[in-house]
Image: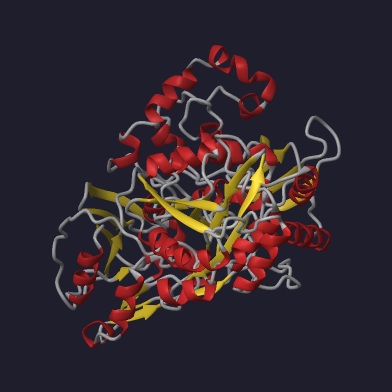
């Protein structure tokens, strides 16, 4: 849970279907040259794709986040190396107290205090009123912040200390294991920029968050639509002077398809805190994001020293760059673990895949070690479930399911699948019809990883009498089949974060619908109950036991074949002192320090 967009990635998925991993768009574009061996204190960073907008509450775009994290600040953020929640706008982590009486009894109160030094660019103090304003933006039903709103709907009200406007308490309607991180990672907006006419001044947050008042909001507050029209506009997402936050940089310009330039503020208030808080660092005078979508152009830019940093280097290119002295003389190449998980999804409601023994048999036919070695050149770590091994509640009792054709055959026979007509494919009678075990693997037509993976499986599956058909379709078609559950097997990836896992969005039966993300149809009353208990159990030891039980349940059911967590591939120019991170996007230009020599 780094930023709000990371919250969305965790709960709603950063869904990379079939064409995930080392794929890259192939659209050509040029990049204006910058001096080789530059001595200027400017970081030239590559963006692999164009951001959609620079307005945190109404985007879930990864590349937008890379830009806006330099402009906006949060109450707390995760340290890029330790993953510890660390103060940013707030002086410290909040005081947390359960609410035992009143309208929010059973919920939790989070009390924060903003730094005394914190001011907006016009010199006015940043206070609890700004937090209240930001939450009113979020809960304005006309603002295009639906995804963020749905994941923060446990918030009910905010109370600002009458004697200290920088101190405030946010009240919630229920306990939530990632409540602190979720609230703390909302970007704070200045009202004088985003609501110059005071349209939200007379609206209370509690009215916007009260479920009983949702139907009458538009009638009660017609100005909600007027505000939303302004806030949702491109003017407040792309224009200099309109994209403003509490952070150290301002938007100078955005040339579509070319570059985005950020300039450092002079006399930024956060400079007073940098010595003791690395998250407040802002060392470069300027950050220039070069939009380079093509992998070949990216490699050329590295060789010509036209960029200082890039991540998401194609795996094969990264291996080649490690052997290229022209590059290694000027760049440090890093491969930190990425907080991402690659998997194969199985439709548990498909008649051929309903039996968990069949799903386990298919898992035995996937040689994960071979996949890591051949498709990612060894740059990945095997995973056996949805919880990262680094989490304290990882179930260490669960062991990797070995590649074993013999075991797959035995399980299929146990489940009633035998080759009755000796054609090499096992079959079984289902609903009065003899059905052969042919499985359609859904892949995007241009997805490198998904297609390469399918080709490996085409070799191993027939060894156990299972026929694999690769169904290559456009992404829109693939996405529609996932929504309607008219698929059998697909590959994808999830983004993950260093927060306690909330399984509801991906695993609960409430999400098993066309608009939900329980794509594989997993779940029962027992698994739902475990998920619901985990979400509200604040005691870490008690919650760990629930987590391990849930992992055991998933392991037994095998709705997904868990593959590996990839390693990120990035290059950082040696003219800067900078550390890579496992947190997206794996580098943070604000922290880059120009070397004296």
Give residue 190's quadrant in the image: top left
What residue is at 37 percent from the left and 64 percent from the top?
22
What residue is at 66 percent from the left and 38 percent from the top?
432
Is residue 574 visible to the viewer in this orientation of the structure?
A: no
Q: Position of residue 127 (x, y in %)?
A: 55, 43
Q: Quadrant of the C terminus?
A: bottom left
What number of labels is visible?
Answer: 0
Q: Position of residue 496 (x, y in %)?
A: 56, 59
Q: Position of residue 1 (x, y in %)?
A: 57, 56
Above or below, 304 relative to 322: above
Above or below, 286 relative to 173: below
What residue is at 59 percent from the left and 46 percent from the top?
435
Give residue 554's quadrant in the image: bottom right
Q: Position of residue 363 (x, y in %)?
A: 61, 64
Above or below, 190 relative to 43: above
Q: Which one is in front, 393 or 576?
A: 393
Q: Which one is in front, 452 or 12?
A: 452
Q: Is residue 37 left or right of residue 440?
A: left
Q: Is residue 33 left or right of residue 232?
A: left
Is residue 388 visible to the viewer in this orientation of the structure?
A: yes
């Amino acid at each position: 849970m780094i930023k709000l967009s990371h919250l969305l990635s965790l709960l709603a998925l950063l869904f990379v279907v079939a064409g995930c991993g080392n794929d890259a768009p192939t659209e050509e574009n040029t990049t204006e040259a910058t001096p080789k061996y530059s001595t200027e204190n400017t970081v030239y960073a590559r963006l692999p794709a164009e951001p959609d907008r620079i307005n945190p509450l109404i985007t879930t775009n990864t590349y937008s986040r890379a830009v806006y994290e330099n402009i906006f600040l949060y109450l707390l953020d995760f340290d890029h190396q330790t993953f510890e929640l660390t103060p940013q706008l707030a002086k410290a982590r909040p005081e947390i107290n359960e609410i035992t009486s009143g309208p929010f009894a059973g919920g939790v109160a989070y009390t924060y205090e903003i730094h005394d030094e914190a001011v907006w660019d016009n010199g006015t103090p940043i206070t609890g009123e700004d937090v209240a304003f930001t939450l009113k933006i979020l809960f304005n039903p006309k603002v295009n912040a639906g995804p963020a709103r749905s994941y923060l709907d446990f918030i009910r009200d905010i109370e600002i200390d009458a004697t200290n406007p920088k101190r405030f308490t946010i009240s919630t309607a229920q306990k939530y294991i990632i409540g602190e991180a979720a609230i703390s990672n909302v970007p704070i907006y200045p009202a004088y920029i985003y609501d110059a006419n005071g349209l939200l001044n007379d609206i209370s947050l509690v009215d916007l968050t009260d479920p009983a008042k949702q139907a009458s909001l538009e009638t009660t507050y017609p100005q909600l639509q007027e505000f939303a029209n302004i806030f949702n506009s491109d003017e407040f997402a792309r224009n200099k002077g309109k994209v403003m936050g509490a952070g150290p940089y301002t938007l100078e310009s955005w040339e579509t398809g070319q570059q985005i330039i950020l300039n450092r503020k002079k006399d930024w208030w956060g400079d007073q805190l940098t010595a003791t808080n690395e998250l407040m660092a802002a060392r470069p005078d300027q950050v220039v994001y070069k939009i380079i979508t093509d992998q070949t152009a990216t490699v050329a830019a590295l060789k010509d020293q036209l960029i200082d940093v890039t991540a998401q280097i194609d795996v094969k290119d990264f291996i080649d760059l490690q052997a290229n002295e022209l590059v290694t003389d000027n760049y440090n190449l890093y491969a930190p673990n990425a907080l991402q998980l690659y998997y194969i999804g199985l439709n548990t409601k498909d008649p051929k895949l309903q039996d968990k023994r069949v799903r386990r048999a298919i898992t035995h036919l996937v040689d994960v070690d071979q996949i890591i070695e051949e498709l990612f050149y060894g740059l990945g770590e095997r995973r056996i479930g949805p919880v990262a091994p680094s989490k304290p509640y990882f179930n260490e009792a669960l062991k990797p399911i070995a590649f074993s054709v013999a075991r797959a055959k035995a399980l299929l026979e146990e489940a009633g699948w035998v080759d009755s007509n000796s054609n090499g494919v096992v079959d079984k009678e289902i609903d009065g019809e003899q059905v052969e075990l042919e499985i359609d693997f859904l892949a995007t037509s241009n997805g490198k990883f998904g297609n390469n993976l399918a080709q490996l499986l085409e070799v191993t599956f027939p060894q156990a009498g299972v026929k694999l058909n690769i169904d290559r379709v456009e992404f829109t078609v693939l996405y529609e089949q996932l929504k309607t559950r008219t698929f059998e097997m697909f590959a994808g990836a999830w983004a993950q974060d260093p927060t306690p896992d909330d399984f509801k969005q991906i695993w609960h039966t409430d999400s098993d619908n066309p608009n939900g993300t329980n794509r594989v149809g997993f779940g029962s009353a027992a698994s739902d109950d475990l998920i619901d208990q985990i979400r509200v159990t604040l005691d870490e030891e008690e919650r760990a036991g629930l987590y391990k039980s849930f992992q055991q349940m998933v392991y037994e059911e095998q709705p997904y074949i868990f593959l590996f967590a990839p390693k990120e591939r990035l290059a950082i120019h040696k003219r800067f002192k900078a550390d890579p991170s496992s947190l997206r996007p794996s580098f943070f230009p604000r922290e880059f320090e120009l070397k004296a020599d």
